[in-house]
Amino acid sequence: MNLNRLTVNHNRPARPRGAVLRRALGLLAVSLIAGSTGAQAFPAMNMPVGVTVLSHDIYRIHMEVLWVCVAIAIAVFGVMITALIRFRHSKGAIPDTQMTHSTAAEVIWTIIPVVILVAMAIPATRTMLKIDDTRGAGLTIRVTGYQWKWQYTYLGQAAGISFFSTLSQSSNFARQLDSGIDPRTVPHYLLSVDHPLVIPSGVKVRLLITSADVIHAWWVPAFGVKRSAIPGFVNELWVKVLPGHEGVYRGQCAALCGRDHGFMPIVVDVKTPADFAKWVAAQKAALKQASTAPAPVPAAAAPNDAPVARTGAVPLAAPLARRPLTAQVLD
């Protein structure tokens, strides 16, 4: 063992006063710079604001709780860092081995967290109750989940409009094994449908969600809400897109509903109330035209005793040949 080396290291000059503090502040500055750079590189790390009344309320509560947590973290870590720097052994601090119990301190650090939790719980509970309040809806739509598509049935003034919404053909072709299609060339790959759900903006839309086979989940991130579609049950949710946020919004089934779970997108086309009224009128006119169209005339049936064209058919036995037959052509 090299005792001279140990002696030299032991007697090395002490660091200048405040060197530890400056080093800690330097590391903190580097961390803040790196954090700001990361925030600029990943702007979607925070919760999105959304386009509905509920999504704005949820975002407001999220930010309020976040800043409360930031303030608590600054206070706690500030006290810890101050204690570590001011009362360190190198400055001659002596640990207190006779620390006495303080009932007042325990009461204070119990009451303060309770007050903070109650203050945060009041607006959160108010918003949760608001999410489940579907009263006063101006439009009601029944949403039924199937493997792997959605059925939208309009009720009330738009009654009679009903259609299925399935994955678009472009995405369906590209997803096939050995299709030879680059998914990056398909617009909105796996997030486009043939018939989107159409709703008006500025109107409270009530959705009655159920399922015909397995458990699904109706979820559009921009709306800030999600509900499970369970066979035999009807769940409710409501959305009210703020005026000025008309457009197309996309989501997906958020439940593991089977092997093709990833191919069950949700597309909602939000229109102005005037454009939505025009869309409803056009849909009802198409339904009326389809209902009044003459039914196709069936082909004339051949007489019962007429010969039947059969390819490779075995001749009928004599007793069966005397029975009346219905004319049909087999491929």
Image: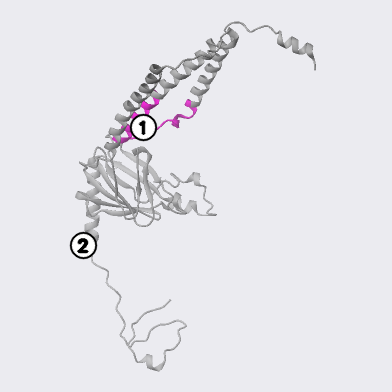
Of residues 188 and 98, the one nearer the viewer is 98
Q: Amino acid at mark 2?
A: Thr
> Residue at point 49% right, 28% down?
41
> Residue at point 37% right, 44% down?
219
How many angstroms separate mark 2 from mark 1 (CA)? 47 Å
Q: Position of residue 8 (x, y in %)?
A: 74, 9
| Location of residue 76 by image quarter | top left
Where does the magenta region start and end?
Answer: 39-67
Q: Main secondary structure of the magenta part?
A: helix
Q: Label 1: how many residues lie within 10 Å, few (<14), some (14-19) or many (20+)?
A: some
Say if 58 sits above or below 248 in the image.
above
**Image side of residue 71 versus residue 277, left or right:** right
Of residues 172 and 150, the one nearer the viewer is 150
Secondary structure under the numbered disc 1 in the rendered image? loop
Residue at the extreme right: 1
Q: Position of residue 64 (x, y in %)?
A: 35, 26
Q: Are marks 2 and 1 in contact (CB under 8 Å)?
A: no
Q: Which residue does the numbered mark 1 point to in the structure image?
A: 49
> Can residue 52 be seen in this snapshot?
no
Q: Which residue does the numbered mark 2 point to in the structure image?
A: 292
Say if 135 sits above or below 164 in the image.
above
Quadrant into which the C terminus falls: bottom left
Q: Position of residue 224 (x, y in %)?
A: 35, 38
Which sits earlier in the primary sequence, circle 2 or circle 1?
1
Q: Amino acid at mark 1?
A: Val
> Can residue 264 be seen in this snapshot?
yes
Was residue 26 drawn as part of the magenta stretch in this picture? no
